[in-house]
Image: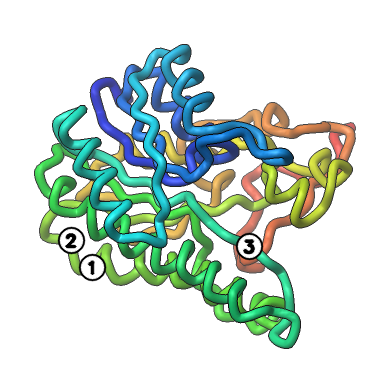
Amino acid sequence: MSLAGKTLFITGASRGIGLAIALRAARDGANIVIAAKTAEPHKKLPGTIYSAAEAVEKAGGKALPLVVDVREPDSISAAVAQAVERFGGVDICVNNASAIQLTGTLQTEVRRYDLMHQVNTRGTFLVSRACIPHLKRASNPHVLNLSPPLDMSPRWFAGHVAYTMAKYGMSMCVLGMAEEFRDDGIAFNALWPRTGIATAAIEFALAGEEGMRHCRTPEIMADAAYAIFNAPARECTGHFFIDDVLLYETGVRDFDKYRVDPTKSLMPDFFVPENTPLPPGVSLGPKT
């Protein structure tokens, strides 16, 4: 298993899960296109495309930091063209950029509705569309969307219809494109965490500093993504993976290493179907 020399185009890679995926691939000597909006330090959110690029280079990879707005087709096209010019192609596309607001219908302003759909569903569609012609020429091409299984339980919609639709739109891209491009050998898969992941979204939008202690680290998603990227694309497509289930199937047994605070119980994430059992020996309770 190695991503040496592979080129990954990752949206939202300046921090969080996107950056963790980038660093995991960089350890193999991969080329990382950091496609994100943050060029200047944010007063709350950590990292910029340039700090991410520095971390990628230190990890052993080659970095191309690009300011990209996934809502703008021209911005996407220009970034993909620069990636191909710099590295010769695109082997893996990671649709990680996302917008979140957990509000009910009457509390969701139109501009926030539009933002979530433009970034999540539309952005995923446009970035995938721009990368596909280059992925067709790759030896083991993968598209990975950081989006949930398509579980149509009403409880996932009732509290935040707009957000759920926007995230499920990303997953519908997986469902449709996996079949559409099956004969081209391009794998389209989704990856979703069983628990909260310690990112800025958790800290500032959902659960605060205390909530972070009930999360797993982004490295669990990075390790799961790495396993997907190394799978044969023609044999691994159209799946909606849960991080710990996938990693257990690849031989991982120590999941405590991914806990932010082993003394705290883990916070379940949204959208994980009830019929998704924990891997044998894995618990969401505090480590005793």
Q: What residue type is labelled 1?
A: Glu
Percent across and percent down for residue 97 are: 49, 52
> Disc 1 marks which residue?
179
Name the residue: 32% across, 55% down.
127
- The alpha-carbon separation of the residues under discs 3 and 1 comes to 28 Å
- Nearer to the camera, 35 or 214: 35
- The alpha-carbon separation of the residues under discs 2 and 1 comes to 5 Å
Residue 75 seen in the current view: yes
Q: Residue furthest bottom?
A: 106
Asked if the residue at tag 2 contacts the one at tag 3, i.e. Cβ–Cβ closer than 8 Å, the answer is: no
Q: Earlier in the sequence, mark 3 or mark 2?
A: 3
Q: Which of marks 3 and 1 is nearer the N terminus?
A: 3
- Nearer to the camera, 190 or 131: 131
- Residue 233, above or below 154: above
Percent across and percent down for residue 110 are: 60, 80
**Foreground disc of the pair 3, 2:** 3
- Residue 184, above or below 285: below
**Foreground disc of the pair 3, 1:** 3
**Circle 1 SS class:** helix
Name the residue: 24% across, 22% down.
5
**Circle 2 SS class:** loop
Percent across and percent down for residue 241 are: 48, 54
Asked if the residue at tag 1 contacts the one at tag 2, i.e. Cβ–Cβ closer than 8 Å, the answer is: yes
- In the image, taking residue 189 as reference, residue 134 lies left or right, namely left
> Disc 3 marks which residue?
100
Task: Give neighbour class at mark 1: few <14, some 14-19, many 20+ (Cα, 10 Å).
Answer: some
> Disc 2 marks which residue?
182
Q: What residue type is labelled 2?
A: Arg
